[in-house]
Amino acid sequence: MNAGSRPLAQLAASFLRVHLLAMERVFPAQSALMEGNDLSFSQFAAVIHIYTHGPMRIADIAEAARITDNAASRLVDRLVQAGYVSRVEDPQDRRQKRVELTPAGQALPDSLNKVAADAYRGVLTTLPTEVRERLAQTMAEVEAHLPAPARTQLQTRRTKA
């Protein structure tokens, strides 16, 4: 390991520790959310993927989930029947259908995000105020360099909240 990679490894380990502490709170809530809404992990993962990346074709869902187009089509059928997604005409190709979240589908990841934010808040509350303030400033700088899809989706949701 060269000198430049050591701080990165330490930083990654620190992020991992904070993440694991938060996930101890998030995973039980995610399981309860899935169970309470009668969703399989694959269905929930598809909802999260659409939430993060926006409306998409069934083939895109299949590729993201690493399943066949037929399996993705059945998965989407179940999500449509449950009221979590709808199929809409693709404005650029009317022969294609795009899958998008309904308000009920949007509520699932919104709910999980609230639990996750509360979990991270709980973990970070243990830090002294001055450390939290420095971390908040640093994270604002970090966010400016995050990949566009995640940053764009989160910023869009923040402005709506």
Image (spheres, helix red, strand yellow):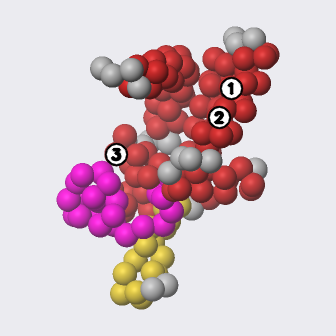
Who's the residue at 37% across and 40% down the image?
41
Q: In screen coordinates, is 84 left or right of 132?
A: left
Q: State how far apart marks 3 and 2 are (Cα).
A: 31 Å
Count residues near mark 1 (Cα–Cα under 10 Å), then give few for <14, some for 14-19, many for 20+: some
For mark 2, give the secondary structure: helix
Residue 156 numbered tag = none
Q: Do the residues labelled 3 and 1 touch (CB within 8 Å)?
A: no
Circles 1 and 2, Cβ within 8 Å, touching? The answer is yes
Residue 151: give x, y in percent of width and height: 58, 51
Tell me, for residue 139, which label it has, or none. 2
Q: Mark 3 points at which residue?
A: 42
Instruction: Look at 33% across and 64% down and name the residue there.
Output: 60
Q: In this view, does 21 lie above or below 68?
A: above
**How many numbered marks does the figure carry?**
3
Q: Can residue 51 be seen in this view?
A: no
Q: Nearer the viewer, mark 3 or mark 1?
A: 1
Q: How far apart are marks 1 and 2 (CA)?
A: 6 Å
**Does label 3 or label 2 sit earlier along the sequence?**
3
First to last magenta residue range: 50-74
93 relative position to 150: left or right: left
| Main secondary structure found in the magenta portion | helix
- Residue nearer the viewer, 9 or 44: 9
Mark 3–mark 1 distance (CA, rounded to whole Å): 35 Å
Q: Can residue 148 be seen in this view?
A: yes
What element does badge 3 sit on? helix
64, 142: nearer the viewer = 142
Of 100 and 134, nearer the camera is 134
The amino acid on which the numbered mark 1 sits, given as a three-letter code, is: Leu
Amino acid type indicated by mark 2: Met
> Which disc, if any, is residue 135?
1
Q: Which amino acid does label 3 sit on?
A: Ser
